[in-house]
Image: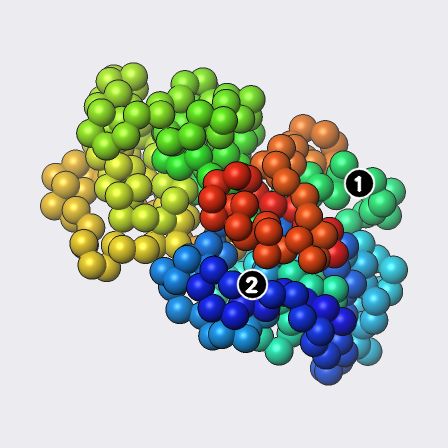
Amino acid sequence: MRAAIYRGPGEITVEEVPKPEVESPTDAVVRITHTAVCGSDLWFYRGQSDREEGSRVGHEPMGIVEAVGEDVRSVEPGDRVFAPFVVSCGRCEFCRKGLHTSCVNGDSWGGDNGGGQGEYVRAPTADGTLVRVPDRHADDEETLEALLPLTDVMGTGHHAAVSAGVGEGDTCIVVGDGAVGLCGVLAARRLGAERIVAMGHHEDRLELAREFGATETISARGEEAIERAIETTYGGATHVMECVGAASAMETAIEVCRPGGTVGYVGVPHGVNEDGLDLFGMFGDNITLSGGVAPVRAYAEDLMADVLQGTLDPSPIFTKTVDLDGVPEGYRAMDERDAIKVLVKP
Ligand SMILES: [Zn+2]
Ligand SMILES: [Zn+2]
């Protein structure tokens, strides 16, 4: 089979690799029909985080079950499924708490299970990892494209909103206009927020934020952006969603948080270790930091129910579609911000 492979910063190739097989009784093999390039893939693509050269890439798989091990109960060959960006068992202490990203039997995609950006993937602990799409929706292309973001960015935006404590009638600020920030806007609206202020740097993305439910957008940079956010919320928002991961975004989030408020953070932290967090400012204003890597498996069924009933549709974040050969071009387009998020149909 063919799969995308990381060959060093700025270099993704599509190569022939061994096709995965059922290795354990709890495995399933999935033929991938839809997957995506992620903003988090850009960290290694840009050489800003380490990744082993020659490793498979991609962690947002959706497809058709091709084979299952003898202990798999929840899916069978022919089922349409998708999988969150980490593997989880669904049975351990942390999976039962809804913290699937800390699963004691967990794993990430891209090792010997194969990456998500390829023709097939081996899904370990398939009963826990895979989410089955009901048959009557299993071949509806529009629905599938709306479900695919539940593998990562929609669940992550939702985690930001939940972590920030967003609820009915609230005012919140979303820091970041990437796919996660945009999904964060959708999530805040879904949870009943009344005012949603989206902060970002790209007019086209902020336009989509408005379509998704942002009531105001701020495209200024630096101090000016912070001042405007504080001014428009009369002193900051009690619920702030940090959806970038860069140290500067975290600083902005803390600065625009109202005293006594909560910053829900879901961006993979980069640069925060070097610069440190402004704990003193958080201390002075009793600001809570909540969040972390999103356990998107915990949210999959709830969010899927809304997609299937037509009240949630994150698919407009996909502004470019490629086939498997187009994956290197997909990385380039996201790196150069020609695309918000790239849909891959192998
Ligand atoms: Zn992702
Ligand atoms: Zn587990």
**Percent position (x, y) of residue 211?**
56, 22
Q: Is residue 48 above or below residue 7?
A: above
The quadrant of the rendering that contains the C terminus is bottom right
Is 291 in front, or is 341?
A: 341
Tag of residue 132: none
Residue 87 visible at all = no
Is 301 in front, or is 28?
A: 28
Q: Residues within 10 Å of mark 2 (few under 14, many from 20)?
A: many
Q: Which residue does the image show at 42% across and 30% down from the upper left?
A: 202
Hey, what amino acid is under mark 2? Ile
Name the residue beneath numbered marker 2. 12
Please identify the quarter of the rendering in which residue 306 is found. top right
Give the residue at the far bottom of this rendering.
Answer: 23
Q: Is residue 161 above or below residue 232?
A: below
Q: Is residue 247 above or below residue 203?
A: below
**Percent position (x, y) of residue 336?**
47, 44
Q: Which residue does the image show at 83% across and 40% down from the upper left?
A: 140
Mark 1 or 2, closer to the camera: 2
Q: Is residue 27 left or right of residue 44?
A: right
Q: Does any atom of ligand 1 lie closer than 8 Å to the CB of label 2? A: no
Name the residue beneath numbered marker 1. 141
Please identify the quarter of the rendering in which residue 233 is found. top left
